[in-house]
Image (cartoon, rainbow, N blue to C red):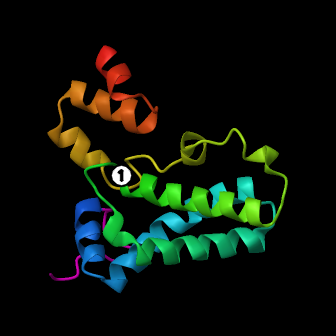
Amino acid sequence: MARTLTPSNRPYNEPAIVALLKEGDQQAFEELYHRFAPTLLRKLMHLISDKQQAEDLLQDSFVSIWLNFHQFDPTKGRLFTWMARIVLNKALTHVKSAKLSPESLENLSLEELGKGTPSYYWIGLDHWIRSTLAPHQRQLIQLMYYQGYTYQEASDE
């Protein structure tokens, strides 16, 4: 497969980057890192006050993402959500192992970690969504992926 992604000048194409990552493509991993590391680091900084520790946890998280990418299943969710879960798990493990006060994490959920998740415009889906999906389909994406509705709640809307 030819390399089709570069960190700076290509729109985000999740299926393409997933295919490249499944092949072990390091350039695709660099693309993933450059695109999502800043957002994930900001989320970690809300959980871990020490910037150096947050950066270390981010690096550990990306190592886990690289080593365990074979476990990612795109039919079960978005790549960013899967990565955010790994970051959250690393943060929770850090808090437990460092015997830090877990009060700040006790009510934390994946949804809270995902607040400020890049919009579909930012990750390159905006044009595709507007040009190919019907209004009701766009509304479902907004409700489920960006407002956290369950399937049933989105269906009821």
At 39% from the left and 39% from the top, the residue drawn is: 145
Image coords of residue 93 (percent x, y): 67, 62
Type of amino acid under label 1: Arg
Q: Would you name the residue on which mark 1 appears?
A: 78
When asked about the image quadrant of residue 65, the answer is bottom left
Q: Is residue 87 left or right of residue 121?
A: right
Q: Which x, y percent locates residue 20? A: 25, 75
Q: Residue 51 at what x, y percent from top left?
A: 77, 69
In the rendered image, which quarter contains the C terminus? top left
Residue 87: % across, % down: 57, 61
Rendered-image quadrant of the N terminus: bottom left
Residue range highlighted in magenta: 1-12
Q: Please, is residue 149 above or below residue 24 in the view?
A: above
Magenta stretch mostly in which secondary structure? Answer: loop
Seen in the picture, residue 47 relative to 133 is either above or below; the reply is below
Is residue 95 a member of the stretch shown in magenta?
A: no
Write down the quadrant of residue 131 in the picture: top left
Residue visible at 29% across and 61% down in the picture? 14
Q: Nearer the viewer, residue 105 or 120?
A: 105
Residue 25 drawn above or below residue 150 = below
Q: Residues within 10 Å of mark 1 (few under 14, many from 20)?
A: some
Secondary structure beneath label 1: loop
| 41 with respect to 101 (left or right) | left
Counting the numbered discs, the total is: 1
Residue at position x 22%, y 82% in the image: 3
